[in-house]
Amino acid sequence: MLLLAAQSPHDAIPDVALGKRIFASQCAVCHGEGGTGGRGPALTHAKLAKAPDEESLRKAIAQGIPPEMPGAWQLSVREVASVAKYVQGLGTVLPEKLPGDARRGAQVFGAKGCGGCHLVDGVGTARGPELTAIGAKRNGAHLRTSVIAPASHLPEDYLMLEVTTAAGRTVRGVRAAEDPFSVQLRDAGGALHSFRKGELKQWRHLAGESSMPSFAKQLSAGELEDLVAYLAGLRGNQ
Ligand code: HEC
Ligand code: HEC
């Protein structure tokens, strides 16, 4: 029987260094070195869809997520807790010192209409990813690139896809959901389209294409730094 609860006080203390070694030898084959993604999804998010809290994360690691993610039955309770701790750390970016002024950055965010596509603390429109806790997930360099060259750093949950149905209809959009049998796209107008993979003639990932326009020409160097400082300061309810 699998025991997820700690068996002794010693078991309860996770060791991140141990977790890192286990990750490199048993998880990186699928999740990439440092959890940046590969055959399995990237784990460098502050919130993981299938493992949103520590308990569900430990459970996902120990028991797996059928059918594609194998359970790590060979790991002890303490080893599972250690990998879980390491994985949690992958999604947290420590605050860094940035040159911009976050308060002015908030004004730039409003003036440039970023809220037309992004939610921050419940305000705005969710056409793109929610940014309420973006500063806890991405460092300043990533945020800067996201604004001036959006297509170069596509978060994998905003993958652009183009599918062609057996009837010859072509639809492009951002991937809203995907499982082994079906895929859902949200088109530029916001409408959701659902397809069974078996019924598609072809489908391809549009690498390097983003539905977010580049703001490189619309921002002065100072405005860009202020905006980055503002985004980096968005750390959820911390
Ligand atoms: C054989 C490949 C493979 C191995 C090895 C593997 N995983 Fe996974 N993992 C996956 C796949 C595929 C998914 C996506 C499953 C799904 O969403 O149905 C996944 C999902 C996850 C998730 C949930 C991610 C999310 O966004 O909710 C976590 C956490 C995770 N894996 C951690 C680990 C850890 C830690 C290890 C090592 C102990 C590991 N995995 C080993 C393939 C693998
Ligand atoms: C027309 C809609 C639209 C507008 C306007 C827009 N974005 Fe985006 N943004 C997106 C989409 C969609 C993504 C998801 C990835 C992609 O396609 O680039 C994204 C991604 C991002 C990311 C990366 C998120 C991550 O998880 O890494 C940041 C940061 C960001 N936008 C900030 C901004 C800022 C700041 C502005 C205003 C200057 C802005 N966006 C304006 C649609 C938009």
Image: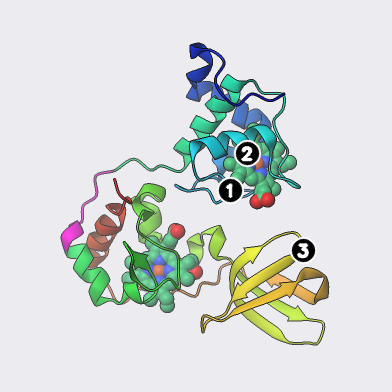
The answer to whether residue 32 is seen in the rendering is no
**Decide: marks 2, 1 in contact (CB < 8 A)?**
yes
Report the amino acid beneath label 1: Lys
Which element is circle 3 on?
loop
Query: What predominant SS class does the magenta segment belong to?
Result: loop
CB under 8 Å between discs 3 and 1: no
Q: Report whether 84 appears left or right of 91.
A: right
Q: Give the range drawn in magenta.
A: 96-103
Amino acid type, residue under disc 3 in the picture: Phe
Could you tell me which residue is drawn at 72 percent across and 74 percent down?
195
* On screen, residue 95 above or below 115: above
| Camera-side residue of 63 and 199 | 63
**Residue 41 in view (yes/no):** yes
Ligand 1 shown in quarter: top right
- Does mark 1's beta carbon lie closer than 8 Å to ligand 1? yes
| Residue picked out by circle 1 | 50
Measured from the top left, where is residue 18 in percent x and y?
55, 21
Q: Is mark 2 on a helix, strand or loop?
A: helix
Of marks 3 and 2, which one's residue comes earlier in the chain? 2
| Residue at numbered disc 2 | 60
Q: Is residue 12 left or right of residue 162?
A: left
Q: Name the residue under label 3.
A: 181
- Residue 13, percent from left and from top: 47, 19
